Amino acid sequence: MLIDSHCHLDKIDLSPYNDDFAVFMQEAEKQQLEHMLCISIDLEAYPAMCELVNPYDNISLSVGVHPNVDEGHDPSAVELIALADNEKVIAIGETGLDYFRSEGDLTWQHQRFIAHIEAAKATGKPLIIHTREAKVDTLRLLKEHGAETVGGVIHCFTEDWEFAQQAMALNFYISFSGIVTFKNAKSIQDVAKRIASDKYLIETDSPYLAPTPFRGKPNYPMYVQHVAQFIADLREVSVETVIQQSNENFRRLFNVAQ
């Protein structure tokens, strides 16, 4: 049974499923998708996202505002703490820093990131970290604000082994998306080979970043099986081993019962 540790279910293309989320969920069950973590990126869409997934016990939620969102409400730590007081919410984020899509004075991005770290510490819920071209400041802010007390995951990992080691030293897991299957992703593949079996997760980040052989097409949580297979081949183990290990890591990190 598969777990997709990071997806955006309110953003996926439902046209192959008669534009019906219930039909999509039926297909997900057929394809052995046991659990999904649906990720928040802004608060304006959050109520509708909650309503969409609330009927399903096998979907959990995060709460947070993505570092690139520059419109809409920017929550304080107090507001995030209140929103996280929901049994379906198991994580804070996604949050972090992104210097690729955002330019200029990014003090606001740092302040937002710090608010999420403080909310995670107050609630005891792990962080979901997005970082792009900002690895030095990402690690610095995590250290300076005591994020290791709650830990979390570096989602959609795109860095190198040195960064992975520093993140793991701060009590963070490493999550591999479909990017690991891309031919030019050699440094990510190196990390996937070397990482300890108890420190990695797998995800789709759907509807974005579909793995090979679906690259460039809409992504779906069911495609996490292709990420699992690719990592299994890299590590020279069975795909069942990768699924079992990543599932155990997910449940340990997010305190989700089987």
Image: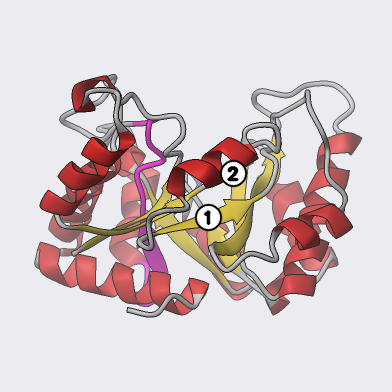
Q: Of helix, strand and loop, which one carries label 1? A: strand
Residue drawn at x 48%, y 51% as measured from the top left:
160
Relative to residue 70, is residue 89 drawn left or right? left
Residue 197 visible within the image: no
Label count reads 2
Circle 2: is it few (<14), some (14-19), or many (20+) Cα within 10 Å?
A: many
User: Circle 1 sits on which residue?
Assistant: 61
Relative to residue 220, is residue 50 drawn left or right? right
Please tell me which of labels 1 and 2 falls first in the chain: 2
Relative to residue 9, is residue 134 drawn left or right? right
The magenta segment:
195-209
Q: Amino acid at mark 2?
A: Ser
Q: Main secondary structure of the magenta part?
A: loop
User: Circle 2 sits on which residue?
Assistant: 40
Q: Quadrant of the C terminus?
A: bottom left
User: Distance from label 1 to label 2 (Cα)?
Assistant: 7 Å
Whole-percent x and y of residue 199? 42, 72
Residue 15 found in image quarter: top left
Whole-percent x and y of residue 107? 90, 37
Residue drawn at x 42%, y 56% as measured from the top left:
175
Residue 12 found in image quarter: top left
